Image (cartoon, rainbow, N blue to C red):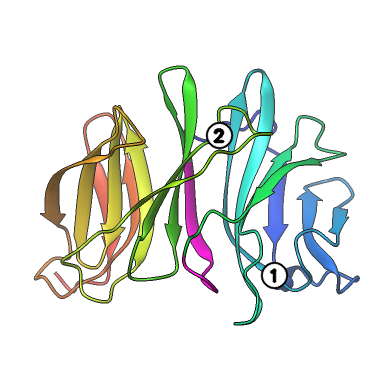
Amino acid sequence: TTHISNASLTFALGTECNVPNSNAFAHFFLYGNSDLEIDGQPSPNQDAYDLDITRIAGREYAFIVTHPSNSTQRPEDFWIYDISDNSDPKLTAHVDVNIIPNVGINVVTVAASGSNRYAYLANDDTANQLIIVNVTDPQNIPVATQVNITGVGNNKINDIAFLNNRLYVAIGNDVRVYNVDNPAVPVFLQSINAGGNGSGTVNKLAITSNYLYAATSANN
């Protein structure tokens, strides 16, 4: 679902970027070009955990998810930048999509559903783990749908993959599959034990037209 028109565009996000200005959220690092600071947005020292890039209505957008830097904050955790001009990215929207205080977002995958675009997010908690946001209009983000995934102990979502209105969610040693023909009301279809002997954690997913691939911590 990720569209990149400029393969030389690479993002380096979060405190690991060695940003000279301590108030800077991130560097947009252009391979073979100069880097760009985005100062003061989001809050200083917020960590970026994941991003996806997609085209909407002929423009390219970066969708970035973050964590609060300390337990007293509940800042916006979902950030959208218009990167159509990658030398001058513009902040389009920033919202707090997580209903759980002091919990950030770990994963974002943006996908098409008919003429609409949806962001599928995973929070850093063991309740209401899956968050679905309509991003068809990147400047106006509606209230998110949150889905509580039960029966997975204290596990968090590690990854999300999408294909043909099916959502694949890596959590614990399972891959949970949802029908998202209507993304506002996801329907659980099945659970696939992809963790080998049952003790392995599913860490990453990749999907093609015929196969789902899972990287796990299982020994067999």
* Numbered badge on residue 127: none
| Helix, strand or loop status at disc 1 | loop
Q: Are marks 1 and 2 in contact (CB under 8 Å)?
A: no
Q: Is residue 76 above or below residue 199?
A: above
Magenta span includes 102: yes
Q: Residues within 10 Å of mark 2 (few under 14, many from 20)?
A: many
CA distance separating discs 1 and 2:
22 Å
Q: Earlier in the sequence, mark 1 or mark 2?
A: 1
Mark count: 2
Residue 55: give x, y in percent of width and height: 61, 27
Hey, which residue is sitting farthest left in the picture? 197
Please provide the residue range marked out in magenta.
100-109
Q: Is residue 138 left or right of residue 156?
A: right
Q: Amino acid at mark 1?
A: Gln
- The residue shown at (82%, 31%) is 85
Q: Is residue 209 left or right of residue 111?
A: left
In the rendered image, the quadrant that contains the C terminus is bottom left
- The residue shown at (86%, 74%) is 22
Q: Quadrant of residue 12?
A: bottom right
Residue beneath disc 2: 135
Residue beneath disc 1: 46
Q: Is residue 113 above or below residue 72?
A: above
Residue 214: give x, y in percent of width and height: 27, 54
Q: Is residue 42 left or right of residue 7?
A: right
Q: Is residue 28 left or right of residue 111?
A: right
